[in-house]
Image (cartoon, grey):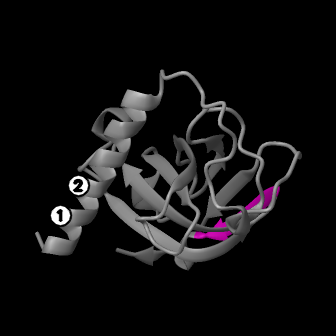
Amino acid sequence: MNKKHVFVTMLGFILVFGFILTGCATPSTSGDITPAAAITQSVGPQLVISITDIPAEYNGKLGWLMVDTGSSAGDPTVAWAYANIHNGSVTLRLLDWVTDQAFNKTGNYYIALLVYEDFDSVGPNDLYYGYITSIEIGERTSLGFYEFIKY
């Protein structure tokens, strides 16, 4: 296993572990934690991302999406979602990283798609890791699997 894959796998594991630890915490009342220039404030409905053309080998697997404010995986995560992949596609309803409430802030983001065998294997055991460094996310965004860069 090359060093890059080990690093990304460990980063994913740390992010998931951090999510588990903070998932039950009291939501922050200090306001928006992301840079104002990174997103457009929206009072609209929960953002939804659909990914199509996923290879058949991933059908029945868990698709996990991370949404970050910058152009790399090291930038602050602001939203996340997961759902099972069926018939080569997955529809993900974004949740706020801190509050787990519906995420509705449109803007330009870094996104990462991870595929796992199932929910119990979330962490360092990803079957696929792909990312898009800069993508405009609106109320409903549709992406093709081919748009992700495999890490």
Secondary structure under the numbered disc 1 in the rendered image: helix
- The answer to whether residue 41 of the structure is visible from this angle is yes
109 sits to left or right of 62: right
Asked whether the beta carbons under mark 2 and mark 1 sit within 8 Å of each other, the answer is: yes
29 lies above or below 53: above
Q: In which quarter of the image is residue 101?
A: top right
Q: Specify whether residue 118 is in view.
A: no
Residue at point 57%, 44% (across, down): 81
Return the residue at label 1.
6
Compare residues 73 and 117 and report the one nearer the observer: 73
Which quadrant of the rendered structure holds the N terminus? bottom left
The three-letter code of the residue at mark 1 reads Val
Task: Give the residue drawn at x 61%, y 49%.
Answer: 33
Residue 149, quarter of picture:
bottom left
Instruction: Classify 10 Å Cα crowding around label 2: few (below 14), some (14-19), many (20 and above).
Output: some
Give the farthest residue toward the right.
44
Examine the structure image and report whether residue 141 is included in the region drawn in magenta. yes
Number of residues whose C-alpha sits closer than 10 Å to that of mark 1, classed few (under 14), some (14–19) or many (20 or more): few
What secondary structure is the magenta-colored segment mainly?
strand
In x, y percent, where is residue 53? 58, 68
Q: Looking at the rendered structure, which numbered label has been put on residue 10?
A: 2
Q: Is residue 93 above or below residue 7?
A: above
Query: Which amino acid, mark 2?
Result: Met
Range of the magenta residues? 139-144
Q: Residue 44, labelled with which disc?
A: none
CA separation in Å, label 2 and label 1: 6 Å
